[in-house]
Image (cartoon, rainbow, N blue to C red):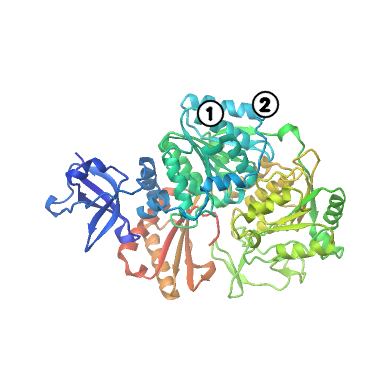
Amino acid sequence: MGNFADIIIDLNSKSLDKTFQYSVPDDLLPLISPGTQVVVPFGQREIKGIVVSLSDSPKIDESKLKDIKEVPKKQKKIMGDLLTLSSWMKEYYACTLNQALRTCLPVKEKTDRRRKKAPEQENAAKAPEIPKIEPTLSDAQQKALDTFKSSYDNGDRKPFLLYGVTGSGKTEVYIKMIEHVLSMGKQAIVLIPEISLTYQTLSRFYSRFLDKVAVIHSRLSKGERSYYFEKAERGEVSVMVGPRSALFTPFPDLGLIITDEEQEPSYKSENAPKYHAREVAYERAKITNSALVFGSATPSLEIFEEVRKGNITLLSLPNRINDRRMAHTVIVDMRQELKRGNMSMLSKQLSDALTETLQKKEQAMLFLNRRGLMGFISCRSCGHVIKCPHCDVSLTLHRDKRLHCHYCGYSTDNVDKCPECGSKYIGSFKPGTEKVEAFLKKKYENARVLRMDHDTTRERDSYEKLLSAFAAGEADILIGTQMIVKGHDFPNVTLMGILAADMSLNALDFRSAERTFDLITQAAGRSGRGEKEGVVFIQTYRPDSYAITAAAAQDYEAFEKEEAAYRRLMSYPPFSHMLLLQFIGRKKEKLMEAAEFTFSIIRENDPGLFLMQPRDAGISKIDDEYRMAVTAKDDDRGRLENAAALVSNALLTEKVFSQTEVFFDFDPVRGF
């Protein structure tokens, strides 16, 4: 039994994305099972592969089958559930099995021998000491925990959404859930967006789980990540915290997956396979019979729709810990500031409030919303944004000096004055954190200012150092992009200023309102988290936008109702599905030929499918590679999967794709 093995060859080739059968020598039979890495003859060489399945009968003449040569002594065996997950990802995301396997099975790398201490010791050393006092749960927290425990103990694996306002204590509920699962000998994975990997969050996990918790993040080397995964596989750690890649931790008896801030776009991979961690978490939980908990103060419409359908159980935390008041919010109409002659980046109200905050020796945060700076055109006098008349998304200025829609292909000439009010103050608006920092240092000479953005956090540990310095009171004002608005708790921050709040409304994305609501809500949640009351100033050129007014009121239900109506009307996810086919190549004419061929075979196979003509990507050329796209949309995801399968088969046989890479992105969360 099991004398023949189906093996996937470890080569990144679309033409080899299939299994090859080999004979298993008798002496290797005890060593081989699904997931085992082996060495096999392939052509004129020997190469590694992974056993996908075993059988007792050959698929072809047995005399033509070659023997497996060996099983490497030092190898990392892929666990059964991860092998099953890989097969699911291949089908669901239209990727190759090799791509799925490499995602689920990280390459084994040696940890740098020059390191003086183990990686987790260094991580623990960075985490500040916090009191090891077990917090008393609020009534809402206890109710959420009791519901989870009862469901878990009864074997009910229906997912949960822990929906709580900012500062409501979601992390403490997570910890209690993990403790319950660990008490039964299981393990837990906690997914948090890379942007939220703050020392404060990590310190709480270290404090409660000590050496049983490990953390991975983008700054770790491959060797360090491999080191943690091996510890998890050996049972030396029981809790893995990290971004979406932590989802593939090879725990032997996984019992719980938590996806915090599930609405974050960073959970969607931009490399093949273009998977969404939220969907993969759902599938891995199902495969391993694990509990699944999503958490957010601003749930995605995808998750909330599942709650509405009854597929996910809602756990609510409607109030802040100790019933602290939410910060008072003020919407500032920047159009009126311009009319008053104020050309400054700070409104008079925010400027006055900042002066008062500094006088009180309290701290302030200024969030610069830079999402959506992809060539949109807006008017500073009236706030008008040039939009597509068919899709209600902003048009994008391309190199051809024309404005284009990336959803339906509509285009029009650029403008030099506002078509709404006639103002000449129209164009692209691109503020920067460095300009804000320079302005503040000039205006408030005695203020200590810290800036946190991509440029100031490039070095290892710089992220933690900046936040630690601000938490210690070594600065009065913290300026930053979206990395400062989530997961931070600074009790002395009583003022949050949101600059260019509507910037993300103009992103090349039908989710722009959702992104805006999320960012403003989360940013507002940083103010007034201690004993002192907080205030938030939201500067905008579009004060009547429902995304902004709902965020100012911290009213998710009002926003969700309005946004869901818009999505249904426009047939956007979660009420429909999209497939983005991305074409990348160095020869533009070949790229166009491949894109047009793809369009034609899909149209011929399914004439009724909504399909956009091939178009240039938003950024049509990067690093001398041209980029094009074809978009399909339908209520039935299966119809899009059929289109992807049709193109996948063509990739193997049609020469038109020989100089072009093609990627499939279902329900994309970013523009292309």
Q: Residue at x 74, y 46 (%)?
A: 552
Tag 1: amino acid: His
**In whole angstroms, how far apart are the C-alphas of marks 1 and 2?**
18 Å
Q: Is residue 651 found left or right of 495 in the rendered image?
A: left
Query: Which residue is rendered at x = 57% and y = 51% of the image?
Result: 194
Residue assigned mark 1: 180
Which residue is label 2 attached to?
Answer: 139
In front here: 269 or 198? 198
Instruction: Mark 1: give few (<14), some (14-19) or many (20+) Cα within 10 Å.
Output: some
Of label 1 and label 2, which has the lower sequence position?
2
Quarter of the view holding residue 409: bottom right
Seen as rendered, the residue at the extreme left is 63
Helix, strand or loop at label 1? It is helix
Please give left or right for residue 226 compared with residue 219 in the image: left
Question: Which residue is at a point 21% across and 45% down the rendered structure image?
Answer: 28
Residue 332 coordinates in the image, percent (x, y): 80, 54
